[in-house]
Image (cartoon, helix red, strand yellow):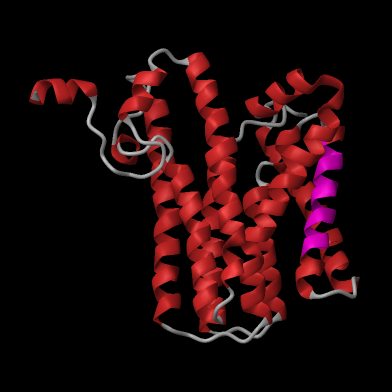
């Protein structure tokens, strides 16, 4: 059963539908402010996915939840709240981001016999404590990060908003951010099919070791900024983008780079020649010697 990609995708879809239904009823029937209702609904959905990840012995059941959850939240508000231009632009940005990321996940997903190397590593290192790490670190923590990132969208749908040039600018920047992320992924897929070097050194990857992560980080800063222009001086709504940035900078990227260092010779030289995130060209030692 786990060897079939189609069946594996149907299983994960079923899990997410169940998570969404239980999350919906949690949101509808808990008598709290919308931001608390959304938080508890997200947690309920996460618990459902976690339970099935234990049953299927595969924490990668959660992987697509990162991109699917924001789309579900946006669609829920679109069908339950009155729409206006600001809400439409914010929805287009998040749905475009989520759809692109989910399609990329489907493309790279093999089946439920495959599990992310990071989860396997954590399982080996934490042993008996892995179920706790699995729930808190692999499932709950990312859900809380996503919740904080989409909270500005929830505020846009639950408070009065004003249309202005700032909304338009940061909508365009959000679209450019997930478009850059998509281009980086396409370049990586092409590189893996026609691998002729150890590291990808062309396109966006010539200027940044993680242009896909950069696009992800910028996406949520732009969404936060869009919401601030739409709602007024609610600067605290940038907190989710900040947490997301810190997560990628101090957790996701270091883990990925340590993994590459262990598997690929010459990583330290590659790292010295290519910036981590900012797409600013950094000359290689070879180019410096030639010019000298």
* Front-lying residue, 150 or 187: 150
Measuring from the top left, give residue 85's x and y in whole percent: 51, 83
Q: Residue at x 59, y 75 (%)?
A: 234
Q: Quadrant of residue 2?
A: top right
Q: Quadrant of residue 91?
A: bottom right
Please check the rendered image and state whether residue 43 is part of the magenta-colored stretch, yes or no.
yes
Measuring from the top left, give residue 268's x and y in whole percent: 40, 20
Measuring from the top left, give residue 177's x and y in whole percent: 43, 56
Q: Is residue 6 left or right of residue 252?
A: right
- Residue 194 visible in the current orientation: no
- Residue 42 visible in the current orientation: yes
Q: Residue at x 33, y 32 (%)?
A: 274
Q: Residue at x 50, y 51 (%)?
A: 217
- Position of 48 relative to 108 (above/below): below
Specify start and end residues of the magenta stretch as a single range: 39-53
Q: Is residue 142 left or right of residue 132?
A: left
* Front-lying residue, 167 or 292: 292
- Position of 203 relative to 78 (above/below): above
* Front-lying residue, 112 or 48: 48
Q: Residue at x 82, y 41 (%)?
A: 50
Count the marks: 0
Q: Quadrant of the C terminus?
A: top left
Q: Main secondary structure of the magenta part?
A: helix
Q: Quadrant of the N terminus?
A: top right
Measuring from the top left, give residue 19's x and y in whole percent: 81, 54
- Position of 114 relative to 250 (above/below): above
Please check the rendered image and state whether residue 198 is part of the magenta-colored stretch, yes or no.
no
């Amino acid at each position: 059963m786990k060897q079939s990609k189609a069946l594996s995708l149907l299983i994960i879809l079923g899990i997410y539908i169940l998570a969404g239904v239980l999350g919906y009823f949690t949101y509808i029937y808990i008598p709290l402010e919308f931001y608390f209702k959304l938080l508890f609904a997200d947690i309920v959905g996460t618990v459902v996915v976690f339970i099935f990840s234990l049953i299927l012995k595969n924490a990668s059941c959660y992987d697509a939840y990162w991109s699917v959850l924001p789309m579900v939240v946006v669609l829920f508000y679109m069908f339950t709240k009155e729409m206006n231009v600001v809400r439409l632009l914010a929805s287009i940005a998040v749905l475009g981001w989520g759809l692109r990321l989910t399609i990329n996940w489907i493309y790279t997903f093999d089946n439920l016999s495959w599990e992310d190397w990071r989860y396997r590593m954590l399982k080996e290192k934490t042993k008996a404590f892995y179920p706790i790490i699995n729930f808190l670190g692999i499932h709950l923590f990312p859900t809380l990060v996503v919740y904080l990132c989409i909270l500005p969208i929830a505020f846009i749908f639950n408070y009065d908003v004003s249309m202005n040039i700032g909304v338009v600018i940061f909508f365009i920047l959000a679209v450019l951010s997930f478009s850059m992320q998509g281009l980086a992924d396409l370049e990586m897929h092409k590189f893996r099919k026609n691998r002729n070097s150890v590291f990808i050194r062309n396109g966006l990857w010539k200027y940044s070791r993680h242009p896909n992560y950069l696009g992800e980080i910028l996406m949520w800063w732009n969404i936060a900024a869009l919401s601030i222009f739409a709602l007024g001086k609610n600067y605290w709504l940038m907190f989710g983008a900040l947490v997301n940035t810190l997560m990628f900078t101090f957790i996701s990227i270091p883990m990925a780079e340590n993994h590459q260092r262990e598997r690929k010779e010459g990583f330290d030289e590659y790292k010295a020649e290519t910036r981590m995130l900012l797409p600013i060209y950094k000359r290689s030692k070879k180019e410096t010697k030639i010019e000298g």
